[in-house]
């Protein structure tokens, strides 16, 4: 049986983390869970440690010294997954904006349909976003359109953070060379996979705005993506995207 790991970065998610852990653990898709907590002052990590006693050997926790960025959290998680022999690695949020039941659909797209990475897409079949202010919907939608135009990626939801990777994709990356630290990290990962000729598939999902807790979005996040995408595209014109030895 293939080994699967869901990675969830957290900062101040005490309202959601216990329910998220219970939900993922009870899914028919048998997967382990790694929480990467950036020293949440609200006690998120303590709740994860309680859950580790309930689900021994399936729930894991890495605690970091502070808010070090979404991208670095996922890179840390990817390295953990590769070091522990996982075959499929998922990214998702803790606030239930991503429906944990959709993990199965992302897995099936990779395991059964031949994708190297599967993206839970808000925009593959229209605009499937619930309870977001219209301004934020438009900003997100046109940001993805802009990224697609600049990069040439055939991906509708370029900024999506709900993804399943085959482990060989992550092995092929030079993870220490991923530049972006914030939400533009999601764009860079998809762009790098595209340039390496991995098969990127999109699975339509419904994205629901968080009910509990506070959003971590800010204008600076979109600024990083807007200007960073141009520099990323320019760098790509002078860069060879060679896969690392997947057996290394």
Image: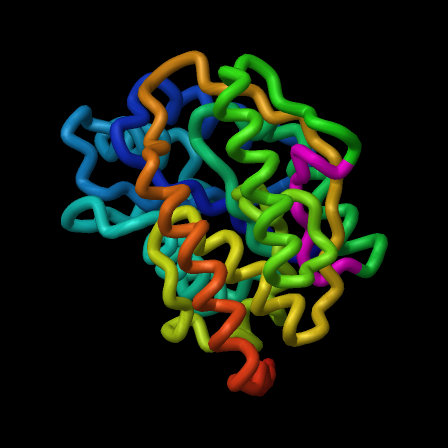
Residue shown at 83%/53% (left/top)? 112
Residue at the right extreme?
113
Res 190 visible: yes
6 and 146: which is toward the camera: 146
Percent position of residue 49, x then y: 28, 34
* Image-quadrant location for residue 59: top left
Residue shown at 38%/60% (left/top)? 180
| Left or right, residue 33 beside residue 12 | right
Q: Is residue 153 above or below residue 34?
A: below
Percent position of residue 110, x then y: 75, 55
Q: Is residue 198 above or below residue 117?
A: below
- Residue 27 lies in the magenta stretch: no
Number of labelled discs? Answer: 0
Residue shown at 60%/35% (left/top)? 141
Percent position of residue 57, x then y: 43, 46
* Image-quadrant location for residue 21: top left
Q: Is residue 235 above or below residue 231?
A: below
60 and 189: which is toward the camera: 189
Percent position of residue 232, x then y: 47, 68
| Left or right, residue 248 beside residue 175 | right
| Left or right, residue 20 beside residue 51 | right
Q: Quadrant of the N terminus?
A: bottom right
Residue shown at 53%/50% (left/top)? 5
Tell me where the magenta segment starts and ends, as one range: 115-124
Res 3 visible: no
199 and 218: which is toward the camera: 218
């Amino acid at each position: 049986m293939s080994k699967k790991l869901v990675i969830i970065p957290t900062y101040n998610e005490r309202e959601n983390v216990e329910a998220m852990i219970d939900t993922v653990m009870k899914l028919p898709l048998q997967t382990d869970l790694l929480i990467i907590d950036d020293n949440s002052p609200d006690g998120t990590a303590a709740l994860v440690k309680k859950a580790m006693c309930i689900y021994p050997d399936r729930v894991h926790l890495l605690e970091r010294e502070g808010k070090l960025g979404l991208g670095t959290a996922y890179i840390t998680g990817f390295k953990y997954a590769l070091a522990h022999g996982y075959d499929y690695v998922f990214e998702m949020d803790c606030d239930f904006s991503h429906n944990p039941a959709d993990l199965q659909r992302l897995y099936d797209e990779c395991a059964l349909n031949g994708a190297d990475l599967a993206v839970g897409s808000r925009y593959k079949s229209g605009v499937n976003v619930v309870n977001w202010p219209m301004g934020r919907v438009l900003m997100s939608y046109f940001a993805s359109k802009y990224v697609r135009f600049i990069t040439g990626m055939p991906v509708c939801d370029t900024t999506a953070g709900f993804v399943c990777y085959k482990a060989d994709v992550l092995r092929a990356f030079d993870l220490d060379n991923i530049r972006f630290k914030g939400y533009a990290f999601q764009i860079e990962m998809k762009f790098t996979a595209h340039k390496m000729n991995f098969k990127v598939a999109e699975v339509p999902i419904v994205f629901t705005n968080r009910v509990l807790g506070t959003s971590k979005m800010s204008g600076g996040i979109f600024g990083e993506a807007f200007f960073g995408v141009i520099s990323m595209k320019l760098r790509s014109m002078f860069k060879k995207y060679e896969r690392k030895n997947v057996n290394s």
